[in-house]
Amino acid sequence: MPVPPQLRQISETIWELPRSFRDGMLVPARFITSEKLLAGLESGVFEQTANVACLPGILKYSFCMPDGHWGYGFPIGGVAAMDSDSGVISPGGIGFDINCGMRLLLTNLTEEEVRPVIKELVDSLFSRIPTGVGCSGFIHCSRSEFRKLLTEGSRWCLKNGFAWPEDLELTEEGGCFEGADPGACSDKAVERGYDQVGTLGSGNHYCEIQVVRPENVFDNKTAAAFGLTIPNQVVISFHSGSRGFGHQVATDYLATFLRVMTGTYGIRTNDRELACAPFRSPDGQAYFAAMKCAVNMGFANRQMILHRIREVFSRVFNRSPQDLGMGMVYDVAHNTAKLETHEIDGEKREVLVHRKGATRCYGPAMAGIPARYQETGQPVIIGGSMETGSFLLAGESSAASTFFTTAHGSGRTMSRHQAKKMVKGQKLLGEMEQRGIHVRTSTYGGLAEEAGFAYKDMDEVASATEMAGLSRRVAKLLPMGNIKG
DNA sequence: ATGTAC
C-alpha cells in the first residue's frame, strides 16, 4: 500500500504526518509501527488518523498503534488524549463495543495433563459459555438488577458469589469505572443487555486454552511475577465486551451527537463518523456516564465468563478452581475513554484518553496498578488470531510518550468478507484440528472470518511495541483449544 | 463489534 508522500520517518518506530498534511490538523499524526507493518497500512488509516488530529482539544499527537487498521471514524488502534476542559469526547474514538477487552487466567496444569482432555474441555466450555450473535446469558437478572450491575461492574459479581476478591484487584480500575449512571442509558440499551451478562458474543470474540512453552518466555523474571512458573504451563485467555448493551449506548449517542454537534456546539468534523460533543457539555457528560455503564457491563460480563471457565475445569479435573491455581493474571480493556493524569510538556494535567483498539500499559511504580505488579509494570494481554496465539507483555515507563498506551491485537489485514471468500470454515476447522488445535464455533462462516491469514503477523506487532518502548514481551501463548462465536 | 437492514 503506498504511504502518503508527506509521511516522514522520525525514528526506527515512529512515522509522522505533519499538520500541513490536512487543513485543520491541530497536532501531527503519529504511526507507531515497524517498517514491515507500515507497508501494510491501508491508506484509509492515514486519513482517519489525520482526521482525528483535527478534533477540538487534542493534545500532542493523534496516534495509531502497530496493529492499526481502518475503523469507524477513528482507526482501530487509535489513541487521542483530549484536554479535559476544552476537548471533546467522541464515541468513534472508543468503539461500538465499549470495553471490549482481554482477560488472562492461570492454571497450575501442564500441556501434558491437559492434552488428553482438550476435547472434553473445549466441548464443555462451548456448552457452558453462551456464544454467537444474540445469545442470552445464564444469570437471569431483572432490568432493575441489571441497572445495579451497570453501576457496580465486577463488584456486583463479587456480591453475588461469582468472583474471588483478588479478581477485582486484578482487573483494570478494580472492575468498575466510578460515576456510571444507568439513567443516561436508554431503555432499549437495557432491554438488549440485561439478558446478556456472561456471554462471549461473535466476530473475533473467543475463549482459548493456551500453552506457554519455555522457548516462548522472553522475560523469565516478569513471567514468574505474572504467575508463569511451570514449563509448558496451561493458561486460558478470552476476549469479549459489553455485547448489545454497549453497542446500543454507542448507537444512541452517535445519533444524539450528530444532531447537536454543529447546531448546539458549533463543531465541524471531516467525517460524520467522528461525531463528538464537548466533554464538559451536558451531552458529553451524559455519554461519558452511559459509556461507564457499558464499561462496567464489560467487566461484569468477563467476570461471569471467568466463573464458568473455573466451573468447567473444576468438573473435568475433579478439583477445586483454587486447587487448580485458576487465579487471574489481569483484565485489560481496549475500547474506552478515561480521565487520567499525564505529563504534557513538563506539566501534569488531567486529560481524557480515548483508546480504541488500544491497551492501557502503566509502567512500574505507577498508581492504579496492583501492588504485586509495582516492580514489573502492569500485564498487557494482546490477543492474536486463533491460529497464531497471543502475547503477554508488561507496561514500561517509556510508554509515557503514548499516554501509556500500546497495541491490543494483531489487527486485521483483510475484510471479513474477503477472508470468507478465501477459506471455508469447515476446511479451516479440519486443518486446525490436524495441527492440534481443537475448535468449536457457533458458525463456520464466522470461523473463516477469523483465519490466521486475515490478521497481521502477531510476532511483528509484539516486537514493534517492544522496539517502540511501549511494552516489553513477557511470553507468547500458543493455542491448544478455542471456542468462538 | 452488532437482535450483521430500528
Image (cartoon, coloured by chain):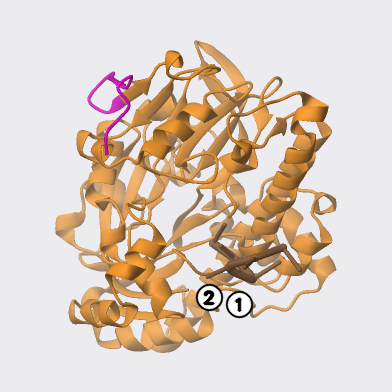
Chain colours: A orange, B brown
Residue shown at 57% from the left, 22% from the top: A58
The numbered mark at residue A132 is 2
Q: What stretch is highlighted in magenta?
A: A1-14
Q: Quadrant of residue A141?
A: bottom right
Towards the viewer: A270 or A288: A270
Residue shown at 59% from the left, 45% from the top: A173
Kind of residue at badge 2: Gly
Above/below status of A126 relative to A76: below
Residue shown at 65% from the left, 57% from the top: A247
Q: In which quarter of the image is residue A353?
A: top right
x, y percent for residue A413: 32, 52
Above/below status of A151 relative to A92: below
Kind of residue at badge 1: Cys
Q: Is the magenta region chiefly helix, strand or loop?
A: loop
Residue shown at 20% from the left, 64% from the top: A231
**C-beta proximity under 8 Å, tags 1 and 2:** yes
x, y percent for residue A39: 24, 37
* Residue A318 showing in the rendered view: no
Q: Which chain carries label 1?
A: A
